[in-house]
Amino acid sequence: MNAAQILRLGLFMADAVNADSTTDPLFTQPELLTWATDATWKAEAELRRAKEDFGLLVLQSNDAAYRWAGTTYSPASLQLTTSTVRAALPPDLLTLKAIRCITSGYETMKFREVDMSSAEFKYGQAFAVGGGTRDDEILYDVVGDNTLALAWPTASTVDIEISYISRSAPLQIYSTGTVTLVNANTAVSGASTAWVADEVRNPVELIVSTDATAPKIVSQTSGGVWVDPSVRHSPVQSIDSDGALTLAGSWLLTGVAGKGYLLATVPNIPPEHHMQIVDALAARIKLKAENRGSDAYFKLEGQGGKRMTSDVTERQLDTPRVVQDYIAG
């Protein structure tokens, strides 16, 4: 499910949708999206408890700059020079797992994590103040707001690679402008769209309306096209420009021109556990409405978290499984 489907299904489950598909005016789409994002982050935390490397990314100091949730980050800041004792880490970093030197001739350089309050780290800092540099082993710590602190600088300028656990960006639902699609084609063109400038991110799915108005999730006006939680929507392969994107598969329906649409984020957890986010959203909706039914949905969310942890743990077990072939008698 994508974010639009999750919001709509959460409203249905919390009995906040009327017979004409309009919604209770007590709830707004931005707050629902915020609650769904919070539930997604909680689900990801459950996954990390079962699978430590969930969300692992690898980044090198010579990679291109990128944007994350409104912040521009240049991996070039990870290049270590003879004066580097502080380096900015990626804004999406949760846990730094490993550092590796990728400069030819320096592959054996070691990086060891040591708390900067320790005597060993402080001694290293004093060594650096005295002009000391080393290339055999570097002591480091992650401090403050994603800052890499080195006890002393390297004796040579080197490029490094970091492996880290990342946090996902907030869920998005984007609907500015209209789209045009051609049958049996993966290309989607947009009019009055700003997909790159407004930082629409993958993984995301395209929901196309039957008219020029974007599909509705929350509205007190009946009529028009509503998001259907049961419909499968088109995954987006890439966002190529402000007015062009590519679908993961060809558009198999009749071509359309100038239609309203939604681009909705797909949560970064296994699809079979997306209902955990829906349950959390329904609980929040009922809680705001001061409905005691919220307790039941909060319990469902907790049970969903346990099921997901158990599911992922089973996938990661090292114990061999012996399967005996069935032989007909």
Image (spheres, helix red, strand yellow):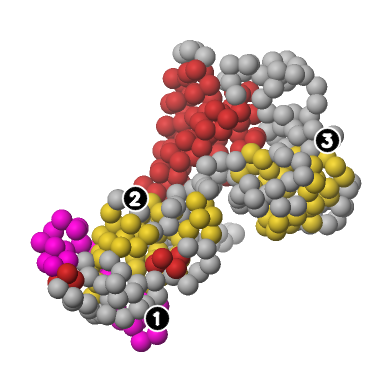
User: Depth check: 324 or 145 in front?
Assistant: 145
Q: Is residue 119 covered in magenta?
A: yes
Q: Residue drawn 70% across and 58% down?
A: 240
Q: In this image, 33 relative to 195: left or right?
A: left
How far across and down, in percent of the image, does residue 150 sit? Answer: 26, 65
Magenta-highlighted residues:
101-126
Q: Which of the 4 image quarters holds residue 245? A: bottom right
Quadrant of image for the C terminus: bottom right
Give the numbered dot on residue 287: none
| Chain-order first, disc 2 or disc 3 | 2
Tell me the kind of residue under disc 2: Asp
Q: Which mark is residue 103?
A: 1
Relative to 40, 113 lies left or right: left
Residue 243 lies in the magenta-colored region: no
Residue at point 27% right, 66% down? 85
Residue type indicated by callout 3: Ala
Mark 1 crowdedness (10 Å alpha carbons): few <14, some 14-19, many ≥20: some
Comparing 67 with 112, the one in front is 67
